[in-house]
Image: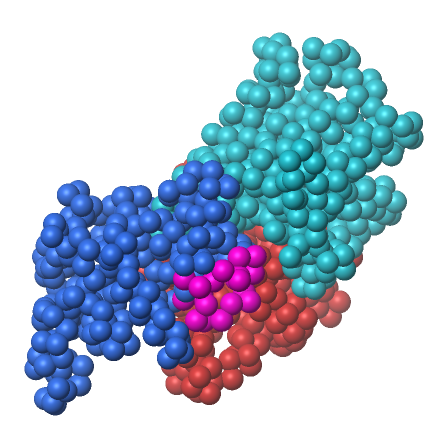
């Protein structure tokens, strides 16, 4: 039973870290109604950035976040300005192909600059923490704590500040929000850049746990999409809940199901979620329909 | 006059909201039935029940002797119920005539035949100059007429018009009113949801009034204009409309 | 009014000059003659490789376009069908000695089944969720193929013995392969044109443009989506089989990859979705370019050709969403979409 408990708890911890990576995606979905197929690559380049800082300056990735998060914010703003903004008034497939193109572009730039080698940061903490009968890597716990702090902070911001309310309004009805005087294009920009910054933070806490290589984004982006679908588009609590579900499932299945089939199992889970709960666990209507011409 | 459509105790629930509550009425062959009511009364939902977009949570719908409750929209279309959409839904990458050909295919299986039928129908609603026009070039008024053409190209037994007058100029309203009034004589039974009440009052043989999902009144236009329940539903207070 | 509308005046029926939906044009006839000429003329082996790959990918792009451009089902998972077709005919040949001339049709049929399954799985999904599900579907197929080693040879792959023979569809001459690939492209092109000119084609356009309105017009959207995906999948599968006969080696990571899926979608997008000539233009532009880049830069810097490619795609998508066909259309006053 101990193994089961250990797996579930580790799953919750890693799942919340996955959730942090997905919050940006769900907000972008909810506010802009577009899917960023390059989301995984944003994570990848942030991870490389954190690795670079760690490698060159000897700082650990958690400290590197101080630089990475603002850098990713600017990067997100740049991508929004150059690509997303221009694609918004065009047929939906334009943003699909453009972000797909961006994904391949970033993957191959990384391949050219960093080669296909898996890169890691040296271990930061030498011991695990023991809580009762369970033990956890410090990096995992630290990542979990940072995620919770961040989520709580975000929720506070969303509920109390004007920006937060503007974002919620835009998620509910972009046109109405514009008519109410909300500067929707600026909200779009802030959401996209902010989502990218969150990915940057996620990358910094994930680098101690995962290696980085050019196609690492592909593994995580599908996880992120499952979380967003499960949690419902635009919902931060949903992303956290979805992340925990995914983390637990992954943790249990990698132990009880053959590792070779583990990934396939995950994709099948994704398809099952799509078939049976396209509106998410919390049942947000319309999540399965974005991209239709309204 | 034989009954073409019968709606029996139809209800549709969305969570806790009864959008349509135990509505019963019938439409006879050759009638022009007006369906009016304030915003949010449930008229669109009722249309969606009849047209098969949503199944009723209770009740039955019988059309032309067949029980069509819970049928899919394309099945309902194939037995002869046509409809327009309140916000026009044209096929944006097809031309005007091709938009109408889709519905025409219910009657004419060949491309040439469907095109001919589409052209005739378009000319009928006054869009003869726009066959090859891309849909994106049409104004709201013309789009509304395209909606009507699409519904009529299938030569329906029953057509559901949903606010086809919105956005039309007064002249266009007059023309369209006369046009719709002439449909029953051509064998097309009409249910007409409309906010431009003047048009309905002039042409409908009978009117049913919906408010908050319930059928609150039924009768000839003149009587409806005087019915206190109807007036209250629209205006919220008693007022002399006569 | 569009250019050169056909006026059937008794016997003399003028053909349109530039491609129009559902009608054969002079341009298309000329293009076919040019292609036949290119096959017949003596080209260097590398150029002949490029030629036959261009034809093959034109066919594959056209096949994708039936689902993606005509029915609006944008899939980034078509490599699954490509792989199913390729593996089916190859397994039938290698393990059961069935000639590929029959095998390719078996592959096409099985791929059609996969296509129908995908459409049914994704029946209620639209937009990005549909696209993501096609990705996930292809990955499931890939991992399945990778792990079912007894059937597919797993990661070691499957090879066809390179002994040339007609019955085994293995040829020494690249010219024969080029003719085969051209035949494939012409077949899919003809099917595409026939579709455009048919009631079924209109049903697909309607489902693509507005499903609710199509439903109200008596069209069964689910049937349309499923049949379009099955047709698109089967034609893609046939292309996969032909590819296997040329390349003589299959392995799941290479054949059922997201990169190949992306290629199938890229070519029609760049050339002009929703037209017949678009995917052809896309392949004629991109396949030679990609081969050129790969051979010149692919070794120098791994990934450089893809960097250039994808940057080009982004630019094309943002500034020419209608693809080449639309861009040319603006210049030549031609309406490719009508």
**Is residue C113 visible to us here?**
yes
The image quarter containing residue C280 is: top right
Residue at image location 60% in from the left, 15% down from the top = C102
The image quarter containing residue C191 is: top right
Judge from the rendering whether residue B22 lies leftward or rightward of residue A107; answer left or right.
Answer: left
Q: Which residue is more in the foreground, C336 or A247?
A: C336
- Would you place residue C180 above or below residue A274 in this image? above
Q: Position of residue C43 (x, y in %)?
A: 90, 30
Chain coloured blue: B
Q: Position of residue A196 (x, y in %)?
A: 58, 69
Q: Which residue is more in the foreground, B6 or C64?
A: B6
Magenta residue span: B125-144
Residue at image location 78% in from the left, 17% down from the top = C171
Q: Residue furthest front?
A: C10
Q: Which residue is more in the foreground, C59 or B204?
A: B204
- Chain C representation colour: cyan
* Magenta segment includes B129: yes
Residue at image location 65% in from the left, 29% down from the top = C187
Q: Position of residue C284 (x, y in %)?
A: 77, 43
Chain coloured red: A
Judge from the rendering whether residue C290 lies leftward or rightward of residue C238; answer left or right.
Answer: right
Residue at image location 71% in from the left, 16% down from the top = C169
Judge from the rendering whether residue A294 lies leftward or rightward of residue A283; answer left or right.
Answer: right
Q: Quadrant of the N terminus of chain C?
A: bottom right
**Is residue A15 visible to us here?**
no
Q: How is the image coloured?
A: by chain
- Would you place residue A161 above or below residue B45 in this image? below
Q: How many numbered markers are drawn?
A: 0
* Magenta segment includes C313: no
Q: Position of residue C275 (x, y in %)?
A: 63, 47
């Amino acid at each position: 039973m101990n193994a089961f408990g250990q797996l579930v708890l580790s799953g919750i911890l890693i799942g919340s870290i996955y959730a942090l990576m997905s919050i940006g995606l769900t907000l972008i979905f909810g506010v802009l109604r577009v899917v960023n197929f390059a989301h995984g690559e944003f994570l990848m380049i942030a991870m490389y950035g954190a690795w670079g800082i760690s490698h060159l300056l000897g700082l650990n990735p958690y400290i590197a976040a101080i630089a990475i998060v603002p850098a990713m914010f600017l990067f997100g703003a740049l991508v929004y300005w150059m690509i997303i903004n221009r694609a918004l008034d065009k047929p939906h497939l334009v943003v699909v192909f453009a972000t797909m193109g961006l994904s391949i572009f970033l993957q191959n730039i990384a391949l050219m600059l960093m080669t296909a080698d898996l890169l890691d940061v040296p271990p930061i903490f030498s011991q695990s923490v023991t809580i009762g009968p369970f033990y956890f890597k410090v990096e995992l716990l630290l990542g979990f704590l940072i995620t919770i702090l961040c989520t709580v902070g975000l929720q506070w911001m969303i509920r109390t500040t004007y920006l937060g309310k503007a974002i919620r309004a835009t998620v509910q009805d972009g046109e109405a929000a514009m008519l109410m005087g909300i500067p929707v294009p600026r909200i779009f920009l802030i959401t996209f850049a902010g989502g990218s910054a969150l990915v940057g933070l996620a990358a910094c806490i994930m680098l101690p746990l995962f290696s980085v290589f050019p196609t690492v984004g592909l593994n995580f982006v599908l996880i992120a999409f499952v979380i967003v679908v499960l949690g419902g588009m635009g919902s931060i609590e949903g992303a956290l809940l979805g992340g925990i579900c995914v983390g637990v499932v992954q943790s249990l299945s990698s132990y009880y199901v053959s590792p070779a089939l583990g990934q396939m199992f995950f994709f099948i889970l994704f398809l099952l979620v799509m078939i049976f709960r396209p509106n998410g666990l919390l049942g947000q209507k319309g999540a399965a329909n974005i991209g239709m011409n309204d | 006059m034989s009954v073409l459509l019968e709606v029996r105790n139809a209800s549709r629930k969305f969570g806790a909201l009864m959008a349509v509550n135990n509505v019963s009425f019938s439409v006879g062959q050759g009638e022009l039935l007006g369906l009016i009511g304030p915003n949010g009364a449930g008229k669109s939902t009722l249309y969606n029940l009849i047209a098969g977009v949503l199944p009723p949570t209770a009740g039955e719908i019988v059309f032309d002797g067949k029980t069509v409750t819970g049928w899919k929209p394309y099945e309902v279309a194939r037995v002869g119920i046509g409809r327009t959409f309140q916000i026009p839904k044209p096929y944006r990458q097809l031309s005007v005539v091709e938009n109408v050909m889709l519905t025409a295919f219910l009657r004419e299986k060949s491309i040439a035949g469907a095109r001919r039928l589409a052209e005739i129908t378009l000319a009928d609603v006054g869009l003869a100059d726009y066959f090859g026009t891309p849909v994106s070039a049409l104004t709201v008024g013309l789009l509304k007429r395209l909606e009507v053409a699409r519904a009529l190209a299938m030569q329906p037994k029953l057509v559901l018009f949903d606010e086809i007058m919105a956005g039309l100029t007064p002249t266009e309203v007059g023309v369209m009113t006369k046009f719709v009034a002439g449909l029953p004589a051509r064998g097309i039974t009409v249910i007409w949801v409309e906010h431009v009440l003047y048009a309905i009052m002039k042409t409908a043989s009978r009117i049913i009034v919906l408010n908050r999902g319930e059928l609150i009144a039924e009768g000839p236009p003149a009587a409806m204009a005087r019915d206190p329940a109807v007036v209250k539903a629209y205006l919220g207070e008693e007022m002399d409309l006569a | 009014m569009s250019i050169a509308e056909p006026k059937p005046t008794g016997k003399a029926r003028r053909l349109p000059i530039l491609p129009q939906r559902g009608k054969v044009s002079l341009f298309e006839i000329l293009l076919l003659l040019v292609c036949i000429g290119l096959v017949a003329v003596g080209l260097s082996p590398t150029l002949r490789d490029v030629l036959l790959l261009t034809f093959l990918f034109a066919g594959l792009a056209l096949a994708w376009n039936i689902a993606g451009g005509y029915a609006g089902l944008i899939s980034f998972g078509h490599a699954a069908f490509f792989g199913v077709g390729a593996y089916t005919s190859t397994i039938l040949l290698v393990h059961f000695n069935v000639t590929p001339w029959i095998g390719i049709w078996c592959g096409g049929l099985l791929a059609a089944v996969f296509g129908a399954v995908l459409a049914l799985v994704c029946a209620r999904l639209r937009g990005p969720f549909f696209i993501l599900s096609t990705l996930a579907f292809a990955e499931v197929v890939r991992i399945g193929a990778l792990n079912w080693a007894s059937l597919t040879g797993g990661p070691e792959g499957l090879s066809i013995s390179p002994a040339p023979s007609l019955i085994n569809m293995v040829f020494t001459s690249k010219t024969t392969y080029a003719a085969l690939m051209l035949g494939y492209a012409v077949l899919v092109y003809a099917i595409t044109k026939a579709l455009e000119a048919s009631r079924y084609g209109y049903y697909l356009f309607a489902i693509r443009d507005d499903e609710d309105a199509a439903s109200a017009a008596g069209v069964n959207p689910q049937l349309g989506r499923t049949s379009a995906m099955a047709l698109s999948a089967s034609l893609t599968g046939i292309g996969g089989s032909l590819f296997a006969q040329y390349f003589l080696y299959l392995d799941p990571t290479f054949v059922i990859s997201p990169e190949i899926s992306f290629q199938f979608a890229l070519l029609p997008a760049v050339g002009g979705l929703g037209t017949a000539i678009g995917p052809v233009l896309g392949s004629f532009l991109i396949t030679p370019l990609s081969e050129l880049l790969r051979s010149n830069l692919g070794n120098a810097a791994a990934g450089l050709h893809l960097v250039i490619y994808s940057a080009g795609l982004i630019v094309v998508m943002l500034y020419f969403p209608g693809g080449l066909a639309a861009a040319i259309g603006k210049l030549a006053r031609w309406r490719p979409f009508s």
